[in-house]
Image (cartoon, rainbow, N blue to C red):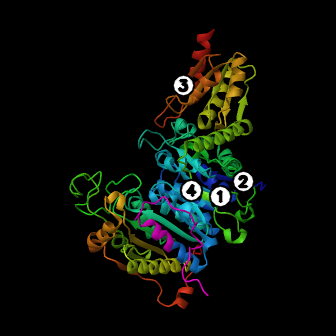
Amino acid sequence: MEAAYSHPKSLVPVQSKYCPGCGHGIIHRLIAEVIDEMGLQARSIITNPVGCAIWADLYFDFDSVQPAHGRTPAASTGIKRMLPDHLVVCYQGDGDLAAIGTAETIHAANRGEKFTTIFVNNAIYGMTGGQMAPTTLVGQYATTAPYGRDPDVAGMGYPIKVCELLATLQGTKYLARGAVNNPVNVKKTKKYIRTAFEAQMRGEGFTMVEILSQCPTNWKMSPVQSVEWVESSMIPFYPLGEIKNTLQPDPAAAAAVKPAGVR
Amino acid sequence: MSEEIRLMKGDEAIGEAAVRAGCKAYFGYPITPQNELTAYMAKHMLDKGRTFIQAESEVAAINMVYGAASTGARAMTSSSSPGISLKQEGISYLCGADLPCVIVNVARSGPGLGGISPSQGDYFQSTRGGGHGDYHTIVLAPKSVQEAADLTYEAFSISERYRIPVLVLADGLIGQMMEGVVFKDEIDPASLPPEPFAVGHQAETGRPNRHVTSINLVPEELEKQNIVRFERYGQVKKELTRYEEVQVEDADLVLVAYGTAARVCLGALQDARRKGLKVGLFRPITLWPFPDAAIGRLAGKGSRFLSVEMSMGQMVEDVRLAVNGRAPVDFYGRCGGMVPSEEEVLAEIERILGKRS
């Protein structure tokens, strides 16, 4: 009899440090499942960012590199250029990607760097304890937005739609936004990750999957309330789906694309 | 060794030496006076099918080095003073993760944007770590185009031997001037042995996971890591400290100078000797580790010292620490992009020795 469901090989069987109801665990699992399905466990490297996911090296059962806050895409660039036949997963949170690391993100995307960014958007700084993120919604509370986010005061301006921002850049080939607040969205998100990883291994260009993720602790909600808040507040502002897909339509034509690292 | 003597700018000679040393990845950002180096790397790295990226910033460039170095590749970046300031975050992480790499600073005058003329105002930044936390980088200070090429070439293997970033601290004069240079043999990056820390290629070896990181939230463990790193620094001090001495044995006054300032001092020394003044020159080649024992030996013999720098006085503090009160230590410096003349240094020598007699 075939096992229909088991622990992914690419994920270490340990209890994580993530809070109850946090989305990181689901996202880790999805990444691990896709890597297992593609048979890439021994050829994968994750860059774990500064933020809650800095512990990703404890959970993914393959090599990792931990760069400075926001410099994750620059480090991923260096790794992928040296190891073009490896799967490089640039795991980033909203502060890492869209605040301190905005320049590194935009330029790695614009260079069409052939790694995949997994962008966990939970609209808050998690590890430092609930400060306003670039993706915090207008009116949303944070320790640094005690009266709710007001774009005109206290910094950070308006919430940034990263997929839409990057979509104008020619180096980006696949930008999708998923969520992990219900089984349907989880399943769709996994498909986006698979599409992005496959495109990376074909060397097509910059790929990113943004994932709306719940942070009950810093949102000061129960896990159930938090998945409902993703649905009621985040998804209306951050629409789900493939925001940009200019991947080669025909796999045979895609196979003819120059491999990464070759001029 | 190819014996062909080539007439080259310092910046380009550094580039050629890095290519020959098997540099597999170069990441740079434009800044004067090191632009010829970045342009040289663009042409010659791309010609060889190696990685060259003009990054969006010095911050990105040093973090690309971090990524490439994590895979065990010989990786390099270069810049000039304000850009090196931007790289300090990345250098701290490279040191915290014990990654080797080569960083070239073709220094200019500061602070702030300052000027584009040569300066030695980055001595403190270079020798004290430069970024946050307890660490050092190895600092090599060339005085000529030939030495800039030789030290850059060697910097890669030194960095790998100790797993410490190596900073080649030149200045705008060495970067921009042309001199004859002979290069060492070319190393094929593919011939270099794999590094024991490098990520990637798990499939071929089946080895356990590797994690390149500088984080450790357990104070007892982080302290131990730092202690182990400092034990390695002790080994570096023992094995790597380098300097050049000129006529120091009978000297009443030893000039202490590195890089461009040392060339000026050599001229001043020759003028002084012609006048019958017993002057020597001590030229540190490694600024970190600083050759304090050798200076201490001279202090014990009764020499006094004059630190000559293109700064307001930075290395002079290390000279004083090395001398440890056993002899007077004077300072003469020009800054803001001014290079001291031999006449100025000679006048200072005469003033000091005259004052003494």
Q: How many marks?
A: 4
The residue depicted at 31 percent of the width and 76 percent of the height is: A239
Task: Read off the chain for label 2.
Answer: B
Residue named by callout 3: B332
Residue wearing tag 4: B66
Q: Answer whether residue B347 is visible to the viewer in this image.
A: no
Name the one closer to the observer, A188 or B288.
Answer: A188
Q: Answer with mark 4 or mark 2, whichever residue precedes in sequence.
A: 4
**Residue B138 among magenta residues:** no
Q: What's the amino acid at mark 1?
A: Arg
Q: Which mark is residue B268?
A: none
Proximity of marks 4 and 2: CB atoms separated by less than 8 Å: no
Residue linked to disc 2: B183
Please name the predominant secondary structure of the magenta segment in the image: loop
What amino acid does circle 2 point to?
Answer: Phe
Tell me the mark number nearer the camera, choosing from 4 and 3.
Answer: 4
Find disc 1 in the rendering and name its residue. B74
Name the N-terminal-most of marks 3 and 2.
2
* Distance (Cα) linking label 1 and label 2: 18 Å
Residue B345, given in percent of the width and then of the height, sits at 58, 25
Q: Looking at the picture, how far across and down is residue A217, in whole percent?
A: 36, 58
- Who's the residue at 46% across and 56% down the image? A50
**Quick check: B110 left or right of B275?**
left
Q: Quadrant of the C terminus of chain B?
A: top right
Magenta-drawn segment = A1-30
Q: In this view, does B314 lie to the left or right of A142?
A: right
* Label 3 to label 2: alpha-carbon separation: 35 Å
Q: Which of disc 1 and disc 4 is earlier in sequence?
A: 4
Mark found first going from the N terminus, 1 or 2: 1
